[in-house]
Image (tube, rainbow, N blue to C red):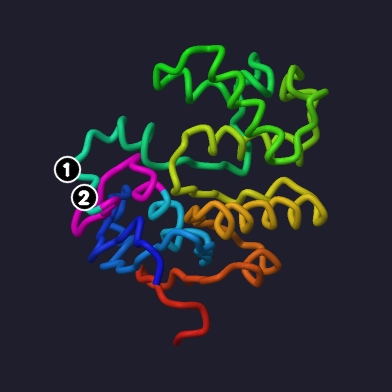
Amino acid sequence: MGEIILELKDVVFSYNTKWNTVDVLKGVNCEFERGKTYGIVGKSGSGKSTMLSLMAGITLPQGGKVICGGVATSDMDLQKYRRDKVAVIYQSFRLLPLLTSVENVMYPMELRGMKRREAKARAEEYLAGVGIPESAFKRFPVTLSGGEQQRVAIARALACETHLLLADEPTGNLDAENSENIIDLLKTLAKERDYCVIIVTHDVDVMDKLDVVYRMHDGRLKLRGEE
């Protein structure tokens, strides 16, 4: 068994609509280990996005705990947690349009106070590591293909220098070939660099490639195939 990097214990979350209260998460329990890829699937509105927000430290559970490195997020400075403990990859890439590829990857390192020269050298290593050619380092996101933009987004996540990667539909805007390449890249990060990669996805082809797949149903998380 690998090192547990993230754990959800009896996590509860609900929200109020104009008409009623919706119980989205009804006591979610699960553990995530380094060195593995995980999928979270479920119908629209099942609670996947809420769970991702809780794991990313965007919000806190209303009951239970999200625990990273043995400490509950409710006992942390959430801004510091988001900066130092977890990295998120989005379907829409969310690259900063006025920064070049290398500047996008430098950004989280500079936020942590790293000198620009060192940040640039590391950013170039991360970009090369995800298959971005040197000729694209100084290009702006709008000039890159979807697959290239997602690779830059992954390099930026690596620059956060955490070992916990959350991916929200990372292949949603990509064609089949690029989707396969991105999932293979994320699997390599888990296997060779001991990352924990958690992917929220609807893509059946993606699910079949992951180590563990959970299904969100009726506010609870079950292993895929369980009743």
- Residue 58 colored in magenta in the image: yes
- Residue 99 colored in magenta in the image: no
Q: Is residue 94 above or below residue 98?
A: below
Closer to the camera in the image, 28 or 36: 36
In whole angstroms, how far apart are the C-alphas of marks 1 and 2? Answer: 5 Å
- Give the image quarter of residue 37: bottom right
Q: Which residues are magenta?
A: 53-69
Label annotation for residue 72? 2
**Neighbour class for label 1 at 10 Å: few (<14), some, many (≥20)?**
few
Mark 1: which amino acid?
Asp
Q: Residue 3: x and y, percent?
A: 36, 62
**Residue beneath disc 1:** 75
**Neighbour class for label 2 at 10 Å: few (<14), some, many (≥20)?**
some
Q: Is residue 134 above or below residue 73?
A: above
Q: Residue at x 40, y 22 (%)?
A: 112
Mark 2: which amino acid?
Ala
Element carrying mark 1: helix
Element carrying mark 2: strand
Q: Residue at x 67, y 69 (%)?
A: 204
Q: Residue 196: x and y, percent?
A: 47, 56
